Image (tube, rainbow, N blue to C red):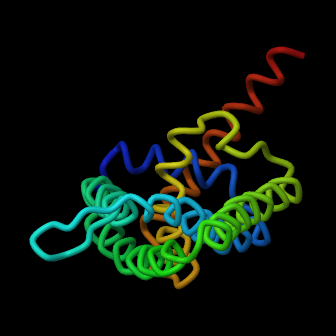
């Protein structure tokens, strides 16, 4: 398999903490909701550039797209397709009075995280965001695309390799535990 090592390491690390279908489902819901909660206040900062109003939510979506595109072109493009409507919705909410847009931003942000924490409690794993907050925040929207591809049975060779690596990691951890005891 000729897949970039950086991508495979990211996918393996993420997938190892996200095996339970309910946890995956809660992440599929929670991460885009969190994105909305983050994009709303980002939409409050904007500038007119060549006749177009561009806000920080747009800039964040494009910045993430560029990063994801360097990891995997197809996943990057699909991310852009799902993030643009979130940025547009955030912009529409962001023009509402602060009491409304701020409340919606807080509710979606904390509601999305609550869903993820419930999922990790079911799976009995520590949320990656607690261990690596910056990396998890940047990578999580990418993994939504990856999960959808997995659910749809697309790019099976990639996911079989990820599962093989997870099994290998679990075997290595079991050996270390036996050595300690």
Using the image, determine if residue 158 lies above or below residue 137: below
Q: Residue at x 61, y 55 (%)?
A: 15
Q: Residue at x 61, y 48 (%)?
A: 166
Residue 82 is left or right of residue 115, and the answer is: left
**Nearer-the-camera pick, 159 or 175:** 159
Q: Position of residue 66 (x, y in %)?
A: 26, 58
Report the quarter where the C terminus lies: top right
Q: Residue at x 36, y 43 (%)?
A: 6
Q: Position of residue 27 (x, y in %)?
A: 67, 66
Q: Residue furthest left?
A: 50
**Nearer-the-camera pick, 111 or 47:** 47
Q: Residue at x 65, y 43 (%)?
A: 129
Q: Position of residue 95 (x, y in %)?
A: 48, 75
Using the image, determine if residue 149 lies above or below residue 111: below
Residue 174 is left or right of residue 40, and the answer is: right
Report the quarter where the N terminus lies: bottom left
**Nearer-the-camera pick, 102 or 85:** 102
How many marks on residues? 0
Instruction: Say which quarter of the image contains residue 71.
Output: bottom left
Q: Residue furthest top?
A: 180
Q: Position of residue 122 (x, y in %)?
A: 88, 59
């Amino acid at each position: 398999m000729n897949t970039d090592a950086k991508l495979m390491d990211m996918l393996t690390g993420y997938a190892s903490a996200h095996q339970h279908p309910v946890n995956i489902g809660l992440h599929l819901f929670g991460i885009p909701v969190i994105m909305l909660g983050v994009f709303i206040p980002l939409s409050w900062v904007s500038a007119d550039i060549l006749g177009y109003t561009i806000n920080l939510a747009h800039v964040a979506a494009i910045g993430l797209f560029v990063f994801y595109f360097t990891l995997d072109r197809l996943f990057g493009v699909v991310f852009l397709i799902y993030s643009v409507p979130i940025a547009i919705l955030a912009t529409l909410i962001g023009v509402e009075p602060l009491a409304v847009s701020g409340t919606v931003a807080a509710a979606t942000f904390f509601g999305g995280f609550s869903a993820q924490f419930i999922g990790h409690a079911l799976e009995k794993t520590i949320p990656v965001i607690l261990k690596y907050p910056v990396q998890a925040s940047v990578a999580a929207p990418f993994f939504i695309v990856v999960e959808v591809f997995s659910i749809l049975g697309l790019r099976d060779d990639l996911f079989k390799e990820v599962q093989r690596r997870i099994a290998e990691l679990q075997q290595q951890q079991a050996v270390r535990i036996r050595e300690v005891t």
